[in-house]
Image (cartoon, rainbow, N blue to C red):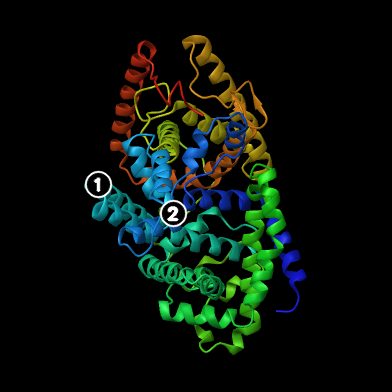
Amino acid sequence: MKNRKILYQSALRHLRTQYFLNVVIVFLVGFLLRDGYQYATDWNQKLMQGDFSYELRENRKTNFEILQEFLSEVHLIQVDSEHLAETTAEKYTMGYFSVIVNEVTASGSFGFGILNGLNKILFHGKIAESVTIFIMMILSGLFWILVKNLLLVGKCRYFLERRLYPHTRADRILFVYRTGCEKNTAKVMFLRDIRQTLWNFTIIGGIYKYYEYLMIPYLMAENPNLTSKEAFALSKELMHGDKKQAFLLDLSLFPLALLDGATFHMTSVFFLNPYKECLFAEFYAKLREEKNNQLEKPELLIDDYLFDTPGTVSYPETQCPTLHLEKHRWLTTDYEKNYSTETLFLFFFLFSLIGWIFEVCFYLVNEGSFINRGTMTGPWLPIYGTGGLIIICLLKPLRKQPGMLFASAFVICGALEYFTSWILEQVAGLKWWDYTGYFMNLNGRICLEGLTVFGLAGVAVTYFIAPVSDNLLRLIPADKRKILCRILGILFLTDCVWSVFHPNTGNGITEGFY
């Protein structure tokens, strides 16, 4: 590969095509792959103000510390016990469940999580903690294998199609599930991760193998029927002689990565991450073109429509050699559809539930404790449901304009969040959220980063979440949907009445939050 300048230009051109949808796809998949969007500004502000509770939350065990502790317990190395006790004391100041969550999430990999669990049970006698760690690691591992890795391949598929087809839909991130090749793709990606993890112990070998395995997700995105042997061999052949080029592509993005911290992650969200996806999709296409005749088995690269457009604006699904049109049709998205009143009613509860789950998980990961967020007792946050319905109904004319949709969702969600906070404070005299200390916050009721997330979420709801959810709801018989609506309505009204007299309050709900 001789000219990187052409790659940069092509990637930038394809990034501009349906720009906001590209941003949302990367944000949505990244949200799942990395367990959420991490706010940077409040963390920095708290440290500047002398609140080191954030520092303690970040002071979790690295993989090296886990390995170091394990080796010290089997007397292979010696560790300063006083220093280890100090860090352990810091770590164990937020409650029992906090310890469990920290042990699982801090380890950084499935293997180190298991090693940490073994260390607890073999040398510290903490059987209950070990069992909990193992259970959570198993659940995390299953999600990683069956969801995260398949979404990673789906994201590659989306950007490969996006190169030539401007009307590529958001549902392409679920491509693997519609091919019937979930098990095979999960197996190949799992083996890639295992091999990469083992090579990482050698450091230099880990870097070398990272670039050797770099094309595997793209290969699986083109042909999810590839065996693990075929996928590894093809990636090795494609990257032969071009690992340096891939490294230089990564290196060229490093200045933007440095800028990301100064812009409170906005650089990554709105440019760096989606641009990198476009860039490496171009890189794969270029490698495939240049080395197709040099491959031992070029016939395994079977989807020529990804690289030679037939002159249409959308990928010709009927010509796809791996896509089963009747497989999981509910995973398709038609964002221009009209939704029935009954569906909108159920959407309110669905979005309210998603918001509740998001906030509960956010506190679970960061605080290590279960906190029933919101003003109500039930598992719903009505502000999310209301915002979702406003975006779907009021912003319907903007569905073909992702940029305007994002801006409008940004403003509407900001107004909704601000006035909801003001009303709650006036009525109950309490705050259920406070963004004081965040960059560009307004009276602690709203902040720039939060509204950015809501704006992107609004686009995701319009183009992906709502259409797929509607398809799922249609699978429920009409009479049962009506019963479900009645039950949810009664429960919600009951909760509303109860919450008027007994609002949900407490630590992490109306106090001690951040």
Q: Residues within 10 Å of mark 2 (few under 14, many from 20)?
A: some
Residue 227 visible in the current orientation: no
Write the residue at 57% across / 53% down: 26
Please state, as top left, top right, bottom left or bottom right, where the N terminus lies in the image.
Answer: bottom right
Q: Secondary structure at mark 1?
A: loop
Q: Secondary structure at mark 2?
A: helix
Nearer the observer: mark 2 or 1; the answer is 1
Check if mark 2's residue and mark 1's residue have beta carbons within 8 Å.
no
- Where's residue 363, x and y in %? 43, 35
Left or right of residue 89: residue 400:
right
What residue would you read off at disc 2?
331
- Is disc 1 surrounded by few (<14), some (14 to 19) or many (20+) residues within 10 Å? some
- Identify which residue is drawn at 40% across, 19% down: 505
Judge left or right: residue 401 versus residue 236: right
The residue sitting at 39% across, 35% down in the picture is 93
Residue 506: percent from the left, percent from the top? 39, 21
Give the residue type that dot 2 points to.
Leu
Judging by the rendered image, the residue that carries numbered circle 1 is: 126
Q: Nearer the viewer, residue 153 or 168?
A: 153
On screen, 232 above or below 346? below
**Comes first in the chain, label 2 or label 1:** 1
Residue 330, label in figure:
none
Residue 488 higher or lower than 365, as above or below: above
Q: Amino acid at mark 1?
A: Lys
Instruction: Work out whether 491 lies above or below 297.
Output: above
- Residue 424 in sight from this viewpoint: yes
Instruction: Please give left or right for residue 489 compared with residue 162 in the image.
Output: left
